[in-house]
Amino acid sequence: MRVYQAKSSLILADQAVRNAGAPAGLPLNPSYYVRDTENRRTTVLEAESFSLLRELILPLQYDELLNRYGENEEELQAVLDWLTAQDFLLLNDGPASGQARLLTGSSEERLKGIPLIPRTIMFNCTPKCNLRCKHCIVSDKHYKQQDILRFEDIQAFLDEADACGVENIVLSGGEPLLWQSIYTVIEDSLNRSYTVILYTNGMLINEKWLTLFRSIQEQKPGGLKLHVSLDGGTPLTHDGVRGVTGSFNRIIGSLEQLNGRGIPVAAVESMATAELYPELDSLITICRENGVGSLYLHPVFNFDRNPQIQELELEWDSRLRYLHRVSELSGLELGVELHYSDPYFPAGLFQEKPSIARKNAEAFLNGILSGNRMESGNYDVVKRDKNVLTNCDGGVSQMFVDYNGDVYPCMIYANSARPVDHCGNVTRNSLLEVWNSEGMNRVRKVMNRNELTVCSQCEHFDQCGPTVKKCRIASEIALGDFFGPSYLCVRYAAQLGIAPELLTSYRQELLNK
């Protein structure tokens, strides 16, 4: 008699209890999905298919299944055929060496709508860096400090992340290749189901790293994604921002070596500054010639009014130039995917429809970092209310671990001059403890339009763009008001045509706090 059993590499996630009665402002999550740790694929399931797969965590003979299905053999066979086609079932007649795992969550009211686990965990591995970038909110304050975390300190945390089906581990810094345990963590990822996304300035890539990167590419295709920083199309611009003469040429050399060894670079990351703007075509050419998949352009944001960062922040005219230029480039065959997003600037007021580059950037934020790459199946959609804001990913699908192990909903909190309580520490707390903590829950608050102190009264509310309104963390850090507007709306109130009496009253209230 044929024995059926789910593959031991599967993680079955039952989100249904948390989805029941979930607030409309939280990002949608499927009620049932399966993560295959063998091929790193996530698939949404309908309730019936998930229920049967859940039964098959333990081996069952066909006649036992048929009894549970009430003798409806045709229906049972159809579901079994679908599960087999998805490669969820063992194809031999013997029991599996292990068992699939089941994730379920509590029905606590405070966790309604919250995913069982984060899809992405971002690590600031080390404060150390070999550059002195003008815009860096990490190294600017901490680069003289020494490493604190070692692989042994976070191994149990990574074990839990792997066992729960976390999809992405992002390694950043400082310069992560200076971290004492970086080689071990990357090498260890060969035995993990998650993808490692490495953000590096590229200057330290040598034969040791090329060999490791190539090994992972061969043994676990797609298991390592490299993002290399490059802030100009010429040495003058890049080195001026990065603070080290010769850094541009060394990074170009690294890109050429990676390309020559067949190691794909997923993306080049660039600060969208006024100096970079005339070199944009050169930067695109560099990416194309070195086989880089994407180019991400990020305007600098200065929530803490840092004078050094201020000189790199785009002014009004420069922001509009970038918006229009990127829209033009979006219609061309560039040979590299262009991503541009100015999330705290009300770009929606200046574009009849988002450019392809802006759509790409939003898809990246909502897809890659959140890990939301569902393959198939249908799931219930929480009805949207236009007056309810959709939360950002911080504390909802991703979290941030600082170089000392402290956990925050996002990196903006961790690197702010404004003191913010952390949500625990990876050396003392489990993944689920920090994920379900009150610190995380604080930023998950679902807000109605009428709770926003300025945005609720602004005539541009429906046009300016969702990100401008939903990042409460940025408003709290920049203005001291969790419910406040974007600090750029305050700065450019006259150009935007925001009612002066509205902001005058708001500024006075802030001063009186």
Image (tube, rainbow, N blue to C red):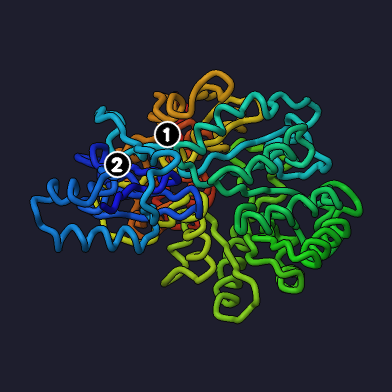
Residue pictured at 36% horizontal, 57% vertical? 460
Q: Is residue 487 left or right of residue 132?
A: left
Q: What's the CA distance linking mark 1 and mark 2?
A: 29 Å
**In this rendering, which labeled residue sits more in front, label 1 or label 2?**
2
Kind of residue sitting beneath label 2: Gln
Is label 2 in a helix, a strand or a loop?
Answer: loop
Q: Identify the residue shown where x is 68% and y is 38%.
A: 185
Residue 82 lies, with reference to residue 508, above or below; the image says below
Residue sitting nearer the eye, 481 or 251: 251
| Residue farthest bottom in this picture | 332
Q: Is residue 46 above or below residue 505?
A: below
Q: Residues within 10 Å of mark 2 (few under 14, many from 20)?
A: many
Q: Which callout, 1 or 2, points at the residue further toward the start of the chain? A: 2
Residue 210 spot, x, y in % from top left: 80, 54
Residue at coordinates 21% horizontally, 63% vertically from top-left?
78
x%, y% of residue 512? Answer: 44, 25
Evaluate whether residue 2 shows in this view. yes
Instruction: Give the farthest residue toward the right.
Output: 246
Left or right: residue 111 versus residue 428 is left
Residue 170, label in figure? none
From the viewer's side, name the closer residue of 20 and 467. Answer: 20
- Crowding at dot 1, Cα within 10 Å, few <14 / some 14-19 / many 20+, comes out as some
Image vertical order of residue 448 relative to residue 222, above or below: above
Q: Which of the labelled discs sits on residue 482, or is there none? A: 1
Left or right placement of residue 478 versus residue 171 in this view: left
Q: Which residue is mark 2?
A: 15
Quarter holding the C terminus is: top left
